[in-house]
Amino acid sequence: MRSLYEDGLVVVESVVPHGSLDRLNKRMVEDTYILRSKKGDSPFNYHPGNLQQDAPPVREHFDPSIFLNPIAIQITSSALGPRPKWTFCSGNTAMPPTTEHPPMSQPVHSDADFAHPCHPFAYVINVPLITMTPENGSTEVWLGTHTDTGLHVQEGLHVHFASWYRNPMKLELADDLRPLIEGLSDVEVPVDWVTKSEALSRYLNRGFGNAHLLAKHLAFDSIALSIEHNAQMPRPLERNQYPSTQVPEHALQDPLVAKIFRHYVESLAAWYDLNDNQRHFKDVVPVRARYNALLLSAILAFAAAHLHRTRGDPMHLELAEFYHYDSVRRLISLTDNVDQLPIGESLAAVCLLRSYEIITRNVSSQNHLQGSYSLLASRHVHLTADLLSAGYWNYLREDITVALIEKRGLMITLSDQNAPPEPAEDMDFANYVTFLLGKLINRCLSVDSPPLGVMEWEALKAELDRWKSSLPPSFDTIETPGLRTPSRFPPIWTLRSWHVSTLHYYHTAVGILWLAQPALPPLKALQRIDDMDCLRRKLDYHATEICALAFSSESAAAWVNAFGPIAFCGPWIQDAQKRAELLDELGKWGDITGWPVSNITDALSLPTEARLV
């Protein structure tokens, strides 16, 4: 990632089978002769020494190892975020010199000669079909010039304002590729579908070259085939559109920046202080952000994204994207000196950027959760009452939320060696059950985990029971008949939002244990029916308690933390009216918090036989 950002180029070798390259090259060489025969009507790229040439857009010549290479997708997804958008596919063929046309290279140029973010927002994947050498017309790249040069080095202007500035482009593909393309989950591919005969009749007759504005969409032209991946953004942002956070105090003098910053402090910081009675994210993070550019940019990115989701103003999304790019740029530069990294502030920033990722994209977005993990993996976190510890518990809760929604293990490894100290205050009990639930998720929901044995299951159950029996009376629920009318859920509530989250995690952990309980000796059919009915009743009880506690809470922080337990346990609810009530509450709090809850509501809307239990 650092090479991409600093040099603008990464070369990856031996990732496409040579046989695949040879097959496509054979067909494209045949097409080259057809294009060259058009003489003055050929799609020359600047001059006759270069042809703009498409590959045949049909299944026969569409090799996924070239067009959908998994290594290329992994790199671009890491740089741009999940599901990068592929909107352009073409090639540049270096033609052999002739008597009429002596050897000529393309002029020095950048294809992005318009205002764009300093952080890369688009990448080109160049796939050479033959070995590139200076003798046969290799591509020349001036490393690093994407960040420190301008139009003054350009030998002429080819596109002053790129037509894909707002990313409207689509590929035109034959419909025999439709099953392959529409089955992709890691790349977004906007397509205009045509019949195979239409595709074959049109792909050599496009208005590329100097004759059409679409001629140039490549940051650097390749010798044969280029594939472009664009980030998912409404439009690139001008470098100086919003105040820089380089000097945070200066940025906070801007009224809009101050407004967004205050929105975080007043409305969003509590999400992160859910189990923290010292309120690090509300009281410490804003103070540190006045002197830490990364932290301020992360706050602005998340807070602006939340305002966009909850109020619908596109201006807030533009601002969020601007400061998100700035945050990523600063994170990359910080990793040059990991030992000097202010890890408490950096981990707090990454937690905020993780929330930005969820708010603007979807829960499955993993870039900043992975970033949190890499920061944690590089340092031993001594769990005390500081900002680093607060960031750690936020990271773990975010990891738990995503794991419960996706029904998988955590990204972080938990063992008894990094267990928190024995609980003393309410906050300690909340963090301890977070640790216990994380351990259970890794042990029971990881794909490669073996089934629990009887002794291990009993030990885990006993550990959870000991924690539950040690809870102070402050965690006891209060039952108030008529608290919610009408409602089919029990009218229970608690005094604090951290009581809600703590009991949510407890009921989720117990539910996982019941699901993971080792199988008993063989049962008769009627015994098996009774056993299944008993399990359903247990799971329904824990799911009902989770929902009832959430419904009685008016805390956005508690609800954001509840989405994971509800996603995992909600399908256990058997009563159709309860599920309908749950769907209403999820929609309401999804709107309030800006959280994308559609995956959760879709799962709850499935017929009974299609749900988990």
Image (spheres, rainbow, N blue to C red):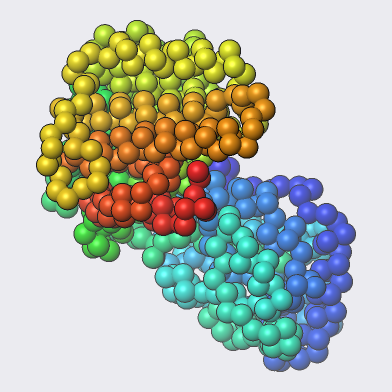
Given residues 458 and 81, the one toward you in this image is 458
The image shows residue 161, relative to residue 124, as above or below, that is: below
Q: Which residue is at the front of the view, 95 or 235?
A: 235
Report the residue at 64% width, 84% height from top.
194
Q: Residue 391 appears at what percent x and percent y?
A: 34, 27
Q: Is residue 482 left or right of residue 51?
A: left
Q: In the image, is residue 217 above or below residue 327?
A: below
Location of residue 561 in the rendering, given as x and y in whole percent from the top left corner:
32, 37
Image-based side of 63 in relation to 248, left or right: right
Residue at screen point 65% across, 72% down: 178
Q: Nearer the viewer, residue 611 or 118?
A: 611
Query: In the picture provided, is 122 more to the left or to the right than 575?
Result: right
Tell me the residue at 76%/90% (across/down): 39
Q: Which image quadrant is residue 30 in?
A: bottom right
Residue 325: x and y in percent read: 39, 49
Residue visible at 21% across and 22% down in the picture: 476
Can you see residue 273?
no
Task: Check the picture and name the quadrant holding the N terminus.
Answer: top right
Please give left or right for residue 149 compared with residue 141 in the image: left
